[in-house]
Amino acid sequence: MTLSLYVDTTRWRAHQQAVLAQFPGLVPVAKGNGYGLGNARLAEEAALLGTGVLAVGTAQEAADVSFPGDLLVLTPYRPGEDTPAVPPATIRTVAHLDALRALPAGTRVVVECMTSMRRHGIARTDLPKLPAGGPTVEGFALHLPLDRPDGSDPVDEVADWMEAISAAGLPTSTVYLSHLAAGDIARLSEHFPDTAFRSRIGTRLWLGDVTALHAAATVLDVTPVTRGDRYGYRQHKAPSDGHLLVVTGGTAHGIGMEAPKHLHGMLPRAKGLARAGLAAVNRTLSPYAWAGRQLWFAEPPHMQVSILFLPGTTKPPAIGDELPLTVRHTTTHFDRVVDHRETLLGAA
């Protein structure tokens, strides 16, 4: 009874190498659920890449992973936080002056700057106030937005910060960046040849080649139904003849749990309205597929399984078969990750 993630390791690692070639000085990111693969596995892969630094989301994640290099904690340090015992080679992020002052001398830190993201960071006016003789500042970090509807140039924003940091008499030898294209990094390196720009990359590195990763659920039971038969917790009526498929994957795995989306344009909004209308009459498409068609949830997912409706005369899968499914890896918890070189069995 498993929800599986199959990894074509050769293809997956070839993609990692391609990204590394595009972004010299890349810093892999392993955080949260490890992009569906787990942080322990990603730490092993990062060690193979030889980047020397692995970024994690929290201090607890730094305490939990094993990595033969530096660990950069992305979440800024908060004075008075309950900090777990982290490895000696841990670099903390600071985003406020009081946090920097609260850390003991010698603590390795990266200073986050307040970019147009406006999430957290040191203001330009605070740069000259950074205390001397305290924590060891090993670089600055600029976390930039994904979209720029105003047409602004991210390189200009980074360049402005570089000038502000230099004007404050602070070193610009290492700057960590998020969400810049390879071409943007090249432009920055040309203008600031003495600075090592290190791109922190997670999604693009681990999930950028969708053909290397295949999710699959195990069929646990198959029950024929006729139109009007009642089933499930809420005793809905079957809309037609068909089969109920009980498959692995439920709310504990993240199945059916959807994060809010920011919609652009009329077509995505229309699709969103259509989905909402169908949901209002208890019709919700599942991420599972069989025989080339996406299946409907027969009812909302249970904690560890889902019940799907396979309509008509389509030949159902057998118990033990696997169904492919399309999920968001950053919100899905797989029961196992399997190195696999073959295509999934069953109907894709």
Image: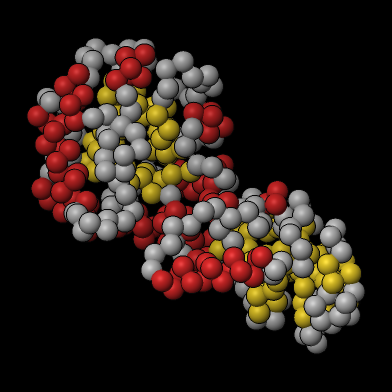
Left or right of 31: which side holds 100?
A: left
- Against 35, residue 112 (above or below) is above
Asked where in the image residue 310 lies, by quadrant, the reply is bottom right
Asked where in the image residue 229 lies, by quadrant, the reply is bottom right
**Which residue sits at x=89%, y=69%?**
230
Going by the picture, which residue comes out furthest to the bottom?
Answer: 313
Q: Can residue 316 be spotted in the picture?
A: no
User: Residue 176: horizontal and vertical position, in percent?
Assistant: 29, 40
State which quarter of the image contains the N terminus: bottom right
**Which residue sits at x=43%, y=33%?**
75
User: Residue 63: horizontal and vertical position, in percent?
Assistant: 53, 28
**Which residue sits at x=42%, y=39%?**
54
**Which residue sits at x=15%, y=38%?**
162
Q: Can residue 314 be spotted in the picture?
A: yes
- Against 86, residue 314 (above or below) is below
Viewer-nearest residue: 307 or 218: 307
User: Residue 157: horizontal and vertical position, in percent?
Assistant: 19, 45
- Against 125, residue 49 (above or below) is below
- Against 77, residue 235 (above or below) is below
